[in-house]
Amino acid sequence: MLFDHYDPLKKEMFGVLDKDGKITNKDFEPDIDDDTLVHMYKTMVLARIADVKALQYQRQGRMLTFAPVQGQEACQIGPMAASAKSDWLVPAFREAAAMLYKGVSLKQAYLYWFGNERGSRYDDDVNVMPINVPIGSQVNHAAGIAYAAKLKKSGEAVITYIGDGGTSHGEFHEGVNFGAVYSVPMVTIIQNNQYAISTPRELATKAKTLAQKASSYGIPGIQVDGNDVLAMYEATKVALERAKNGDGPTLIEAVTYRLGPHTTSDDPSIYRKETEVEEWREKDPITRFKKYLSNRKLWNKDKEEKLQEETKKFVTNTFKEVEKTGQYGVDDVYDYNYETMPDDLKAQKEAYLAYLKESEGE
């Protein structure tokens, strides 16, 4: 089994591709069909272009605070490609690429960062929870959904994400510990992008790896090259198989790097050197995967130029649509918090509607 070969306590990191897109670990090369490989790549490119554009829109005052995903696309696309449509994604706030692959539309994603409540209302067949901003609480949500899936014997599993800094929060411990105790079908992926906002990873925890925290909960943990989309796919695939076989949760540490700011309110030049950023840029997950696809004769220069042109046009047109949307209604604020609205929220909504009616009459 994969996890038996890579011990995080020995800092053994799992990888499949080198930075030139060549297979270095044939024993664990995933079996993925060509169409899926190309779809994975196209979604990574979409996420990157949408990310760059969103940063520009925010700087122009056309979008609210945004959390860039640039550099972490492999951490997200690999696991989503390994998951089934029925499996759940419980994101934090930097999982735009994962959400796009799981079926959230770019328009919905942009609406959220535009400040429109409709951006959290996904299609009924998209098993994705809304963006979660409070650090770590998404792990508790994931544990609860996974517990429900176990009780219902639905065959579903849950993937949730947290950052390296988030593992120092109590909610991380509570969620992973609960999941382990009740052996729920959950996979927790730590995106170790080296910084908890401005705090370096080595100052956030004493542990040599984040994956080794799994041993405290009695579950498997593995450290993976987070810029290797095939390694992330394979590690998650094995973890999901464990989950659905009733063997409980898995903890995956994806070692990656946040190429952009923590959010658009952050200035990373204050706490890290540009030389460090450039070193990680050489390990760009999209560049690496493109080289792999080219080596497989699945991609070429003409396809790349066409994809770039079409995707940039799509992203630009999508945001234009978002900018044309009007204000969301009162129902969008109140009606989606609970399956059945509690009396106190009903009273709040009625009072607000009465206030609006009175204001309109003035």
Image (spheres, grey):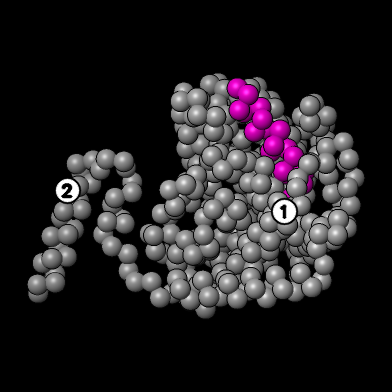
Rendering coords of residue 39 (x, y %): 68, 56
Look at mark 1 in the image and give the residue it sits on: 35
Residue lying at 13% horizontally and 60% vertically, measured from the top left:
354
The one of 58 and 244 positioned closer to us in this rendering? 244
Would residue 104 be seen by someone viewing this image from the given angle? yes
Is 236 left or right of 84, judged from the image as shown?
Answer: right
Q: Residue furthest bottom?
A: 60
- Location of residue 294 (image quadrant): bottom right
Picture coordinates of residue 51 (x, y %)? 61, 65
Camera-near label (2 vs 1) is 1
Dot 2 alpha-carbon crowd within 10 angstroms: few under 14, some 14 to 19, many 20 or more: few
Q: In the drawing, does residue 189 fall left or right of residue 179? A: right
Look at the image and tell me in which quarter the C terminus lies: bottom left
Is residue 51 or residue 291 the one in the foreground?
291
User: Hey, which quadrant is residue 311 in on the image?
Assistant: bottom right
Residue beneath disc 2:
347
Q: In the rendered view, would you say 339 is above or below 268?
A: above
| Quadrant of the frame with the N terminus | top right
